[in-house]
Amino acid sequence: EVHLLESGGGLVQPGGSLRLSCAASGFTFSSYAMSWVRQAPGKGLEWVSSISSSGTTIYYADSVKGRFTISRDNSKNTVYLQINSLRAEDTALYYCAKGLCDTCTLTVFDIWGQGTMVTVSS
Amino acid sequence: QSGLTQPASVSGSPGQSITISCTGTSSDVGGYNYVSWYQQHPGKAPKLMIYDVSNRPSGVSNRFSGSKSGNTASLTISGLQAEDEADYYCSSYRSTSTVVFGGGTKLTVL
């Protein structure tokens, strides 16, 4: 069964940092693009970042560019999101999502994890 | 640029059909056949229902269908069932090599 398990969320002060992880299982991780999508409490979905299967192509939303860094370790079946200079508006549930295919980096998210909550507050 | 525009809410009775619209621009919905639709029940992760405008993933009921005309995509649910009550989000690839979501539509089954 295909499964994504996020971790690393928590309460952090403004300006702080966190590293989110997403462990994948049940599929050939190295063959698929991966993404992070967030959802602020009571709000809609917001795409954050995506990374190609090899890790060579990376995309970011303007709202996080320069502060967030996506990466992956195909030997560990894990994708990461390093989030720095956190702001109150970054408070959200962060979902990890799998691309439907290798070339579906920015088009289709077919499997989602349950999310990890990031709360930015002093 | 802002996100895609969806109605805040729609409703229908069991057995009826409803359609949710998703309006963008020629830089996203109108320019590419990369529109997806996601269903989200309260407290749950989103679930892919339609991709590439009108394709259904394996396991998704054929009561769900998608289409597009110009800058507006649509999700139609026929034979409405109580379990269809959820939030629905559209998304599209955008020419700036980003992804844009709609604000979401709350579907109520009366």
Image (cartoon, coloured by chain):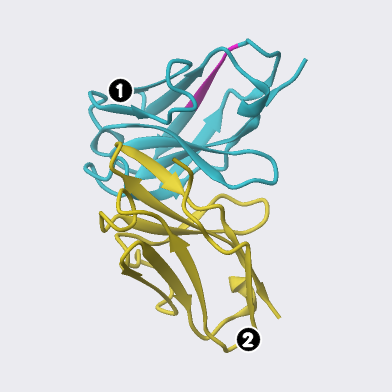
Chain colours: A cyan, B yellow
Q: Could you tell me which residue is drawn at 35 percent across and 61 percent down?
A: B71
> Magenta span: helix, strand or loop, mainly?
strand
Above or below — where is B21 with respect to B25? below
Q: Residue at x 56, y 88 (%)?
A: B16
> Residue B54: x, y in percent?
32, 68
Query: Front-most of A80 and A107?
Result: A107
Q: Which residues are magenta?
A: A17-21
Task: Report if residue A1 is visible in the image.
Answer: no
**Residue depicted at 35% across the width and 57% down the height:** B35
Q: Which residue is mark 1?
A: A75
Identify the disc placed on residue B14. Answer: 2
* Mark 1 vs mark 2, CA separation in Å: 48 Å
* Image quarter in which the C terminus of chain B is found: bottom right
Chain ID at mark 1? A
The quarter of the picture where residue A90 lies is top right
Decide if residue B107 is on the left or right side of residue B72.
Answer: right
Residue A20 shown in magenta: yes
Residue A94, can we see it?
Answer: yes
Residue type highlighted by circle 2: Pro
Which residue is more in the foreground, A35 or A6?
A35
> On the rendered image, what quadrant is the N terminus of chain B found in?
top left
Helix, strand or loop status at disc 2: loop
Residue A78 shown in magenta: no
Mark 2 crowdedness (10 Å alpha carbons): few <14, some 14-19, many ≥20: some
The amino acid at mark 1 is: Ser
Report if the CB atoms under discs 1 and 2 are less than 8 Å apart.
no
Q: Residue at x 26, y 54 (%)?
A: B31
**Of the numbered discs in the image, which one, if any, rests on residue B77?**
none
